[in-house]
Amino acid sequence: MSDLQTEAPLLPVLICPDPQLRKVARVVTEAHREEVAALVPAMFATMYKAPGIGLAAPQVGRLLRVVTIDVAPDGAAAPLALINPEIIGASAETVVQQEGCLSVPEQYADVTRPARVRVRYMDEQWVKREIEAEGLLAACVQHEIDHLNGVLFVDYLTALKRNILLRKLAKAQKELKGK
Ligand SMILES: [Zn+2]
């Protein structure tokens, strides 16, 4: 983690069912260059502090197509900032992995997604890149890109499972506010 990331301001993370989480984020253009330059370090700082392995700008109330990810194990750091990420290929093979979300705190569920995806994006230096993701990174990048489209991991669950999870979340949030 660089000094820049640790010194960046922490941003409040919106919690489900905040309606902002259901909005579609705008494509980043040259006009957002300064805004994104400030947003990316703040998103990394917020994500590491949580701690989480991924964060999408709509989760901090900014409707821009920006995602930060770091799936390196504890102690290591592999920060990945993705601007305007797009999935351009996905494997037919799927895998089930347990997912959680900083906007759905302390609730986890198994989600089925393509095992491997090819992602096109721009990095923080605005350089066009493509990566082939698998394992945890594949699930994480798909989860975060979903956020840019107003989709949450709970949307992949059956209505029954989703309702149970969201009720548990609402109860936990209520108790938190009562303290
Ligand atoms: Zn999430």
Image (cartoon, grey):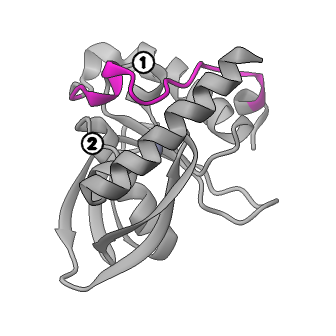
Label 2 neighbour load within 10 Å: few <14, some 14-19, many 20+: some
* Residue located beneath label 2 in the image: 151
Name the residue located 70 percent from the left edge and 16 percent from the top edge: 178
The answer to which image quadrant residue 28 occupies is top left
Q: Position of residue 159 (x, y in %)?
A: 25, 53
| Secondary element at tag 1 | loop
Amino acid carrying mark 1 in the image: Gly
Name the residue located 47 percent from the left edge and 76 percent from the top edge: 135
Q: Is residue 131 above or below residue 66?
A: below
Q: Position of residue 35 (x, y in %)?
A: 43, 14
Amino acid carrying mark 2 in the image: Val
> Does residue 10 show up magenta in the picture?
yes
- Residue 83 in view: yes
Of 150 and 162, which appears nearest the observer?
162
Range of residues picked out in magenta: 6-24
Name the residue located 42 percent from the left edge and 18 percent from the top edge: 61
Q: Taken as a whole, is the magenta stretch helix, strand or loop?
A: loop
Name the residue located 28 percent from the left edge and 58 percent from the top edge: 156
In primary-sequence order, the first of circles 2 and 1 is 1
The answer to which image quadrant residue 142 occupies is bottom left
* Residue located beneath label 1 in the image: 61
Figure quarter occupied by ligand 1: top left
Report the quarter where the N terminus lies.
Answer: top right
Q: Position of residue 146 (x, y in %)?
A: 29, 46
